[in-house]
Amino acid sequence: MGNLLRMDLFRMWKSRTFKVCLILIAVSGLIVAPAGWAMIHLSNLFENVAELFPDTADLSSVISAPFPFLNAMIAMIAACVFFYADLESGYIKNIAGQMPRKGYTVLSKFCVSLMQNLLFMAVGAAFNLIGTAFVQRIVADEGIRNSLVIFLLKLLLMQACCTILLFLVSTFRNKALGSVMAVLFGTGFLSLAYMGIDQVLRQFIQMGTFSVSQVMPDQLLQEASPKPLTALLVSAVTVALFLPLAIGIFDRKDIK
């Protein structure tokens, strides 16, 4: 298993898609604050510029936002490409044949994707900090510790979303399906589908103010400050459900 992890890490690091996505995430983080500053200052539609774009920015607000612009979507697409790489190249036959269980290849990709997501988030937050420093003065406020907690919670939620993508890619062996879901997860567009599910469920049960979107990892990932307990439970349940399922189904399927 150790050799498999090292091999997947090496493959991830050498992947052209990984490098391109890393550059996109860095550029996106770098320009999001200057672009916002330019739009507000160059537009005649906004009178209270200082209120919309103050001169200072809290360090905690930057740390707790590791997915500026479309970085979450980019990271998830990169994960789908990585999950499908062995199947696409045909190497999976040789790799899985050396393992006691074929499903170990799925577990290895899950572990490596966690490292990939952590790197993407760190780069996104770091370049967002640099970009913000161009147009605002960074202030080290008292919320830094809490922002680090939010950062870790978003890492768990991102990994929960990637576990669903891993299940889809490894089970259906379809990178396109995973990529479409990555776009929907990363942009938050599935909120419309969750609203439809809520309407159907309310025809049969009393839900009160509860909404399905409140327990979906992709929706919690979009929140500025997700509730810690909810984020932990949703992440744990999602991984506990979809990872064993993906490993089990992959074990039973013939490798072509």
Image (cartoon, rainbow, N blue to C red):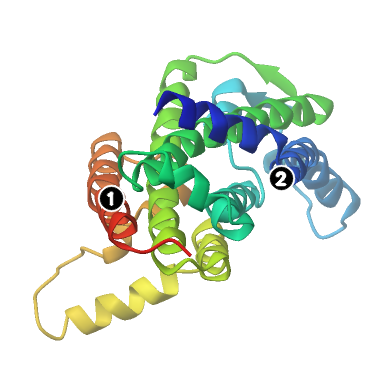
Name, please, the residue furthest toward the left: 205
Counting labels gives 2
The residue singled out by tag 1 in the image is: 238
- Residue at screen point 38% across, 58% down: 167
Q: Nearer the viewer, residue 122 or 227?
A: 122
Residue at 71 percent across and 38 percent down: it is 22
Residue 133 image offset from top left, x and y in percent: 78, 24
Q: Are marks 2 and 1 in contact (CB under 8 Å)?
A: no
* Residue at left offset 59%, top offset 56%: 90
Mark 2 and mark 1 lie on one chain; the one further toward the N terminus is: 2
Judging depth in this view, the residue of 55 and 168 nearest the camera is 168
Q: In the image shown, does 131 or 170 lie closer to the viewer?
A: 170
Q: Relative to residue 36, is residue 215 depicted above or below?
A: below
Q: Nearer the viewer, residue 228 or 50?
A: 228
Residue shown at the point (34%, 63%) measured from the top left: 253
Give the vertical position of 110 relative to 149 (above or below). below
Q: Position of residue 113 (x, y in %)?
A: 50, 39
Label 2: which residue? 21
Q: Where residue 66 sits: x, y (%)?
A: 58, 35
| Residue type pointed to by label 1 | Thr
> Horizontally, is 57 left or right of 252 in the view?
right
- Whole-angstrom CA distance, mark 2 to mark 1, is 25 Å
Left or right: where 22 falls relative to 35 = left
